[in-house]
Image: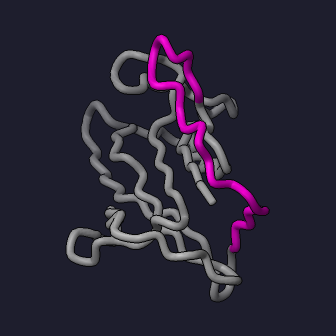
Amino acid sequence: MDVFVALDKIDVNGERVSYPICAYVDGGPIAFGWMRATLRELYASKSTPAQPVQAFLREPKIPEGPVRLDIEIWPFTTLFHAGETLRLTIAGNDIHRWPADILAPGHDLLNNTAQHIVHSGGESASFLRLPVVSKRGPDLD
């Protein structure tokens, strides 16, 4: 199972705000991340609650029932004003794609052979953990 996540900024009119990706392609999300579930084990010594680090040491099979996936989302900075929101998208393939002549075409060799279920609530609560820096000043309302 391969899982992809993307974060988008939504403006006060409900429209997606596009960001440059890799500093030269427009139309990207604020940030993104992905994980192959069989490579979900983390380096305990390198991972933090805000930044999980995959170990890539072995590929344990996925057991029956919910499996915790700590997916690293690449660092980003974005200023949000009142009324703007953050949208998280979860998918089984690349959420944003670009032509191969502009950027790497994406992840085409997927391991998605079964139904994906995102559990939320109770013992299987899903959450998005983001560091938030709040700075107020004359230029930031």
Q: Is residue 106 left or right of residue 15?
A: left
The C terminus lies in quadrant = top left
Q: Quadrant of residue 96?
A: top right
Query: Furthest-right residue in view?
Result: 115
Query: Furthest-bottom residue in view?
Result: 123
Q: Position of residue 4 (x, y in %)?
A: 57, 49
Q: Position of residue 27 (x, y in %)?
A: 54, 21
Which residue is at the front of the view, 25 or 79? 25
- Disc tally is 0
Q: Is residue 12 left or right of residue 79?
A: right
Q: Position of residue 45 (x, y in %)?
A: 21, 76
Tell me where the magenta segment starts and ends, as one range. Answer: 97-119
Q: Please give the name of the residue rendered at 67% of the width and 50% of the height, measured from the top-left corner.
A: 92
The N terminus lies in quadrant = bottom right
Q: Please give the name of the residue rendered at 51% of the width and 34% of the height, measured from the top-left corner.
A: 29
Which residue is at the front of the view, 79 or 122? 122
Q: Is residue 118 magenta?
A: yes
Above or below 119: residue 32? above
Q: Position of residue 40 (x, y in %)?
A: 46, 68
Q: Is residue 112 left or right of residue 140?
A: right
Above or below 66: residue 52? above
Please tell me whether the stretch drawn in magenta is mainly helix, strand or loop: loop
Colouring scheme, one of rainbow, by chain, secondary structure, one colour: one colour
Which residue is at the front of the view, 11 or 72? 72
Q: Is residue 101 magenta?
A: yes
Q: Please give the name of the residue rendered at 40% of the width and 71% of the height, measured from the top-left corner.
A: 58
Query: Furthest-top residue in view?
Result: 101
